[in-house]
Image (cartoon, grey):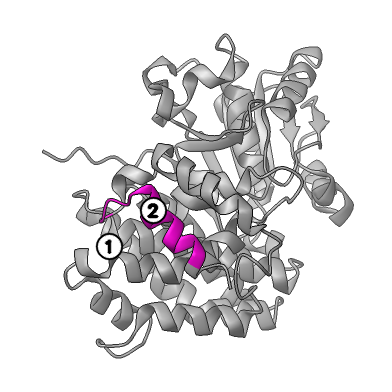
Amino acid sequence: MATIGYLTTAQFDFGAIRLVTGECQRLGIRRPLVVTDAGIRASGLLDRLRESLDAALGFDVFDGTPPNPTEAAVLSALERYRAAGADGIIAMGGGSSLDLGKAVALLATHPGPLAQYAAVEGGGPKITAAVAPLIAIPTTSGTGSEVGRGSVIVLNDGRKLGFLSPHLLPKVAICDPELTLGLPPALTAATGMDAMAHCIETFLSPLVNPPAEAIALDGLAKSSAHIETATRDGSDRDARWNMMMAAMEGALAFQKGLGAVHALSHPLGALPDLKLHHGTLNAVLLPEVIRFNASHVGDKLSRIAVTMGLPANADVAQAITELNARLGIPAGLKAMGVPRDALRAIADAAPKDHCHGTNPRKATVDEYLGILERSYG
């Protein structure tokens, strides 16, 4: 028996940000807290949001989202939410801001501590429909958190955990590719590879969800065809539109489950002081995870190859490695600054991640360590 559901509304096209006031009114949000980061403020995108919000909507701003969202930041934003008398959230930015906004929306209406709601703690059923209403506005084309049911947060105890519930789905996603036109090439590449990893991992997941697989292949086709153009020429509107759609499709699809790439990138992203970019980690890990899973996915790698415009018998892992190089992605974990002596702890943590269970080939700690070693460079 397969239970399949797609529950989110998305407003998608150039200029969609102009719809934000109407969506607030439709959801009954009269005083939103805008959850974002300092970079969005500095880039002028926050001003774009201000211009689109009706003056009758009183709102406050929390711009303290860190590169990997933390429990401490969630609690700081929650304090701002309560002090402002907010009744809903507009999360604007990359996946970090969107994930942070979801966690604030959760704790705004549910008692702490946050850890009790984590998937690995069996916390999903504790998350109810009382979650504060959330509007998500992505400014990158990568995580797809705007249409995802999950939030990934680094807790105060150092664990990077996923919080999964249909109640964490944003009530509406406002996907405006125009907001990505100024995204720098390196961030375009890293977030684009994040979207591609989502499409590939969810397609390879052994769970039964043909609609998700179809969406994943469409997202993979779009990202494969447009990621290099978007990275090379950030003003290319067609490439930006397609990359934002690919990112959204990747997240619509990964309701089916992810795998070993994310089981490793989550604990890597929790390493203190390094501030490792999630999409870049996924890009670096993806080739070796594909090789590890190859014997357990039937003809799916051939279908991925054809979708990417390659011959059916192409080496998909090698093609991803070569694409990474063309995009300027670091050649390995070593180049990202990961110390070799951290690898064992990451391998130990991976089987405890919520993505471990949906990898097509169950990995042991030693096998995870081998993937890390081969991805090290």
Total numbered circles: 2
Within the image, what quadrant is residue 9 found in? top left
**What residue is shown at x 63% (from left), y 26% (from top)?**
157
| Residue type (three-letter) at the residue carrying disc 1 | Ala
Separation of residues labelled 2 and 1 (CA atoms): 33 Å
Q: Quick one: quadrant of the C terminus?
A: bottom right
Residue projecting furthest to the left: 1
Instruction: Pinpoint residue 267: horizontal percent, then vertical percent.
Output: 55, 44
342 displayed left or right of 211: right
Highlighted magenta segment, given as a residue range = 360-373
**What residue is shown at x 44% (from left), y 72% (from top)?**
287
| Residue type (three-letter) at the residue carrying disc 2 | Asp
Q: Name the residue nearer the viewer: 116 or 128.
A: 116
Instruction: Pinpoint residue 149: horizontal percent, then vertical percent.
Output: 44, 37
Instruction: Pinpoint residue 282: horizontal percent, then vertical percent.
Output: 52, 61
Specify whether residue 2 is painted magenta: no
**Where is 208 relative to 128, above or below?**
below
Q: Is residue 176 visible?
A: no
**What residue is shown at x 21% (from left), y 69% (from top)?**
295
The disc label shown at residue 366, or none: 2
Check disc 1 and report its element: helix, strand or loop: helix
**What residue is shown at x 30% (from left), y 47% (from top)?**
358
**Where is 28 relative to 161, above or below?**
above
Specify whether residue 366 is painted magenta: yes
152 displayed left or right of 56: left
Q: Which residue is mark 1?
A: 214
**Where is 306 relative to 349, above or below?**
below
Check disc 2 and report its element: helix, strand or loop: helix
Instruction: Pinpoint residue 3: horizontal percent, then vertical percent.
Output: 20, 37
Pointer 2 local density, CA inside 10 Å: few below 14, some 14–19, many at least 20: few
Question: What main secondary structure does the magenta stretch of the protein show?
Answer: helix
Pointer 1 local density, CA inside 10 Å: few below 14, some 14–19, many at least 20: some
